[in-house]
Amino acid sequence: SQTIHQWPATLVQPVGSPLSLECTVEGTSNPNLYWYRQAAGRGLQLLFYSVGIGQISSEVPQNLSASRPQDRQFILSSKKLLLSDSGFYLCAWSLSIPGGNQPQHFGDGTRLSIL
Amino acid sequence: DAKTTQPTSMDCAEGRAANLPCNHSTISGNEYVYWYRQIHSQGPQYIIHGLKNNETNEMASLIITEDRKSSTLILPHATLRDTAVYYCIVRVEETSGSRLTFGEGTQLTVNP
């Protein structure tokens, strides 16, 4: 069966510091990968998605970036964090099957606090 | 994606069936109904999805009305661990890069 891992679970960072969050998927090949952010008490905001190695699409302009160096690895980064970057970051995957209709499956998230 | 309307909160007794309604009166013919839930401080968990026919899996059943304007998620024997926010999402067939848009959802509290 497929599993998704995110780390770290919680992170406290000062303003202006860099960020690297990692997500890996096991048990499947060539998944679609997603990064979401969930602000406190609010819905999900899609940040980035990827359909393959090195292929990244950005949904929202911001000071975050994403990379997919390997098939099942998705990394969320920032060079200089802002206070507004605080939130609950979620990685998700879905099967890449022609015709779609595949649900997305989420990791346990990283709770990021910027001080 | 079509807008959905769900009750803000519901209570259910442990061991009883939990029936969570969702209205999606503007749903289009090619839009699916998805259900997710989110337990506090965890990532959303996929439960079930369907297009026209009723669906059942090991977690729940999904009943979609004939006109597809509403649906009900049924947890047949609710446990305390089913306490969570339940999200009903209506969206077109998922393709690569498709986003999930979560509304407010229903806070289900299962009581002992």
Image (cartoon, grey):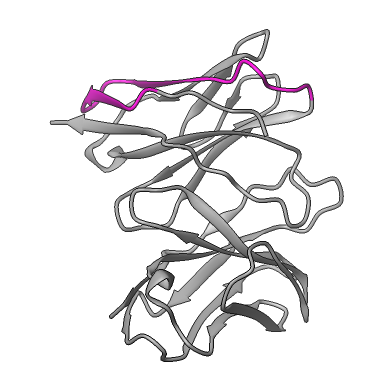
What x and y, as percent, mark residue A76? 56, 79
Q: Can residue A74 be seen in this view?
A: no
Residue at (31, 58) in percent of width and height: B41
Quarter of the image that includes the N terminus of chain A: bottom right
Q: Can residue B4 be seen in this view?
A: yes
Residue at (79, 47) in percent of width and height: A100
Residue farthest toward the left in the current orientation of the protein = B112
What x and y, as percent, mark residue A111? 35, 70
What x and y, as percent, mark residue A52? 79, 73
Q: In which quarter of the image is residue B3?
A: top right
What x and y, as percent, mark residue B107? 31, 34
Is B27 on the left-hand or right-hand side of A17? Answer: right
Q: Quadrant of residue A64?
A: bottom right
Per the image, is B64 magenta? no
Please count the marks in the image: 0
Instruction: Pick whichever, A59 or B7, lies toward us.
Output: A59
Residue at (30, 30) in percent of width and height: B78
Per the image, is B21 magenta? yes
Q: Quadrant of residue B86?
A: top left
Where A25 sits versus B66, above or below? below
Q: Give the range drawn in magenta.
A: B7-29
Where B35 sits versus A2, above or below? above
Is A49 on the left-hand or right-hand side of A16? Answer: right
Residue at (85, 45) in percent of width and height: A99
Quarter of the image that includes the C terminus of chain A: bottom left
Where B39 sits versus A31, above or below? above
Instruction: Pick whichever, A59 or A3, lies toward us.
Output: A59
